Amino acid sequence: MAFIDVSEISWHDAVLNAVSIVPSASGGASAAVDVFVEAYKTHESSSRMRLRLRCDNVKRAVVAVDFLSLLDNAGPGNIGNIYVKSGQSSGGEKLSTLWIYLVDGVLEVAASSVLVEVI
């Protein structure tokens, strides 16, 4: 497994392939969210690399997607930008919020960690 920093990728024109949401098996108020994308490493790259954005101990997730726009823009890229904002929850625990801005949509995931894995 090779992990890279979210800031090392050129997210514009990336493609969203899948989102997986798995509630905690232990019955706690959390889940795991995996987001599978293809993105260019740099603006000069000629091909996209396959990545998994792994969100652990997820506290909340919000998804608003126009599926037709997502499909219509899959070739040129249906992602405008991705970034992670670090902060704290109201209870004081470390919380990272993943923001994925889509063509006509957004995905927001608040989790204890967000990792980018090359797959």
Image: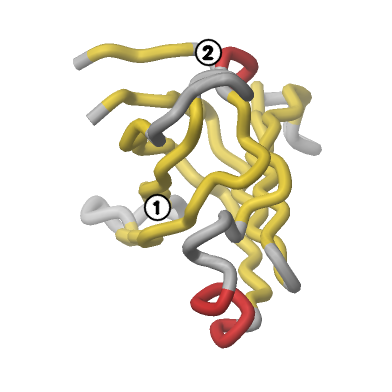
Q: Vertically, is 112 above or below 62?
A: above
Residue flagged by tag 1: what amino acid is it?
Answer: Ala
The tag on residue 31 is 1
**Would residue 110 be seen by someone viewing this image from the given angle?**
yes
Read off the residue under disc 2. 5
**In the image, 118: left or right of 86?**
left
Quadrant containing the C terminus is top left
**Residue 66, label in figure:** none
Rendered view: 56 above or below 73:
above
Residue at image coords 66%, 53%: 108
- Would you call the spot at circle 2 few (<14 residues within 10 Å), some (14-19), or many (20 or more)? few
Rendering coords of residue 33 (x, y %): 40, 50
Q: Quadrant of residue 96?
A: top right
As helix, strand or loop, the secondary structure at mark 1 comes to strand
Local secondary structure at mark 2: loop
Determine the residue positioned at 68% across, 29% down.
84
Nearer to us in this view, 81 or 90: 81
Residue 53 versus residue 76 in the image, above or below: above
